[in-house]
Structures are given as C-alpha cells and as structure tokens.
Image: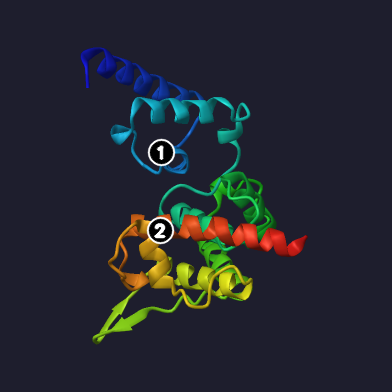
Amino acid sequence: MTTDAATDRLRALRKLHALAHEAGMREEERRDLYERTTGLRSASGMSLRQIEAVCSEIRVRPRGRMRLDGPPAGPQGSKLRALWISGFELGVVRDRDDSALAAWMRRQIGVAAARWTPPDEAAACIDALRDWLAREAGVDWSHYRARGKTLHDPRGRVLEAQWRRLQEAGAMEAAVDLEFACAAILGTVDRRPVETLRPRDADRCIRVLGARLRSALSEAAR
C-alpha cells in the first residue's frame, strides 16, 4: 500500500468511527453492521472501499435510529440479540433490528423500556424466545453428545433447523446434505459436522441459508 493510499484509508477509518459515534451505535451493533456490509466484524481488516461502503450504510440510516430502545446490556442482552437474529435467519422473526426485539420484550413482560429489563425478567424473555423458536422453527436446543462428551452448540442446532425448513419448502436438493452445503458456502472440501464449525464459519452459513430460507418462504406465501 502506498503512503497516499494508507493516508486515505486512515482518514476513512476516522470518519467511520466518527459516524458510528454520532449514530450512537454500540460496539455489537457496529460490528453487526460491518459484517452485514463486508463480511468482516472488524474495521482493521477492511479495504478503503469496504470502509467507504460501511460509512454509506451508516449515513442512510434514519437519524436517531440507533438510539431507540434495545435489549439490556451485558450477557443477557447479547443472548437475547443472538436468539432474535436466529429467529430472523429461521424465517420466524420479520425484523432483525434491536428496536423490533425491544418491542417484543415490552409486549412480553410489560416493561416501559426493554433496555432496563430486570435480570429475572430478561431470563424469562430468553426462555420465551427459545421456546418460540423450538415451537415455530423446530429448533432442538439439546446438547450434542459424542465420545462420552457433551457439547453445547446452539449455532449447529439453528443450522439443522434451517436445513429442515429448507427441505420442507423444497428449496434444497434431496441428494445434498447439510455438511456438504456448509462446505460449499465456506469454499472448502472439508465436510465437518455443524457442531464442530468455528463460530464465525457457522454464522456465515447461517446467514447464507437464512437468506435462501426467507426467499423460499416468501415465494411460498405468494
């Protein structure tokens, strides 16, 4: 990279951080936007063009949108957000944004602001979301068992549920299995059980299958 190119990239990075700050974006929200736009969760590995694309995405967002009510901070909020996004990728949730999750929480437990949900009620929301996805999307949240060991991998369970729904919708060839599909998405010949995928690889597969599932469900609803 030339000196001029490096300088341009540094200026763009500074602009990106300034725009995100002005939009009131929390770190997780910012990284989610990075990933949706470029496939990367950190700006440090982005090219100048990718940084500019993220800046454009922030600019077109409605003013104040990121300051709307959202899930509580901390591990419970992260869990709620992960489950809500899983619901979106499973074709159950229509709007993946934090504001939609907050609206659901307010209806669920009657709070004025989801952001200030007490821990016990946040735990109840987590359980309710898990039950909803099990009921509506067929997610089996049980642990995996292999070689006498127990492994908890909700991403693998979401992938399995996506695959069943895609098959039910006739959107996947019967001769193709989930492990083959994930290997194709990741561009590798290494076919691995979904519960052994790295989190970022599993997330990538979930996003690709989610887009295909939403398209299939939309087509079926017409």
* Residue 99: image location, x then y, percent: 61, 44
**In this view, which residue lies farthest toward the right?**
222
Residue at left offset 32%, top offset 21%: 9
Residue 41 in which image quadrant: top left
Residue at left offset 40%, top offset 44%: 39
- Residue at mark 2: 185
- Residue at mark 1: 27
Residue at left offset 50%, top offset 49%: 72
**In this view, which residue lies farthest toward the top?**
4
* Residue 117: image location, x then y, percent: 55, 52
Residue 165 visible within the image: yes
Numbered label tally: 2
Residue 121 visible within the image: no
Which residue occupies the foreground of this view, 53 or 143? 53
Query: Is 101 left, or right, of 83 in this rendering?
Result: right
Q: CA distance from mark 1 to mark 2?
A: 27 Å
